[in-house]
Image (tube, rainbow, N blue to C red):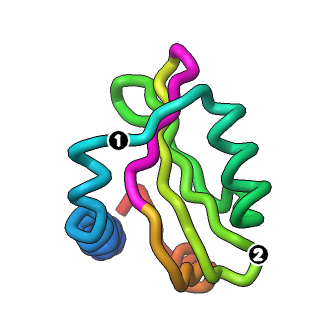
Amino acid sequence: MARSIWALGLALVLGQATVQESQAAQNPTCDQRQRVLGHLADKYKEATVAVGVTNSGGLVEVLSSGDGQTWTIIVSSPNGVTCLLATGEGWRALHGIAATLDPEA
């Protein structure tokens, strides 16, 4: 049950980001991972706040500014190419909720 609630929440967030970023998805911005991370750090003061690995070996990262004003979701392929998936404003970490969810449930 907890896993399905977590998955539903993630799907809603990603779904909303996908709708907002449909134009970017049609023309993804991609570059070498270190350049993308450097740009996001320099321009937006964003750093990685969450990571995950896809079934195909891609690295998905959520980056956010320290105050949560901006956020970015990127995916990096094993060959080092990173693409922006979504960007937005108002990131809020759910530390209390995420810590209580049991991914094995």
What type is the residue that disc 2 sits on? Answer: Gly
As drawn, the residue found furthest toward the top would be: 79
Q: Position of residue 5 (x, y in %)?
A: 29, 75
Secondary structure type for disc 2: loop
Q: Is residue 96 above or below residue 54?
A: below
Residue 55 point in image, percent of width and height? 35, 30
User: Residue 34 occupies which quadrant of the picture?
Assistant: top right
- The residue indicated by pointer 1 is 28
Tell me: 25 left or right of 100.
Answer: left
Name the kind of residue labelled 1 in the image. Pro
Dominant SS in magenta: strand
Please tell me whether residue 84 belongs to the stretch shown in magenta. yes
Q: Is residue 48 left or right of residue 80?
A: right
What span is in magenta? 79-86
Q: Looking at this view, is 46 or 105 the one in front?
A: 46
Residue 101 seen in this snapshot: yes
Q: Earlier in the sequence, mark 1 or mark 2?
A: 1
Q: Which mark is residue 66?
A: 2
Q: Residue at x 53, y 85 (%)?
A: 90
Q: Which mark is residue 14?
A: none
On the image, the x and y values in percent for residue 75 come to 46, 40
Instruction: Measure the C-alpha gap from mark 1 to mark 2.
Output: 25 Å
* Nearer the camera: disc 1 or disc 2: 1
**Residue 94 in view here:** no
Circle 1: element type: loop
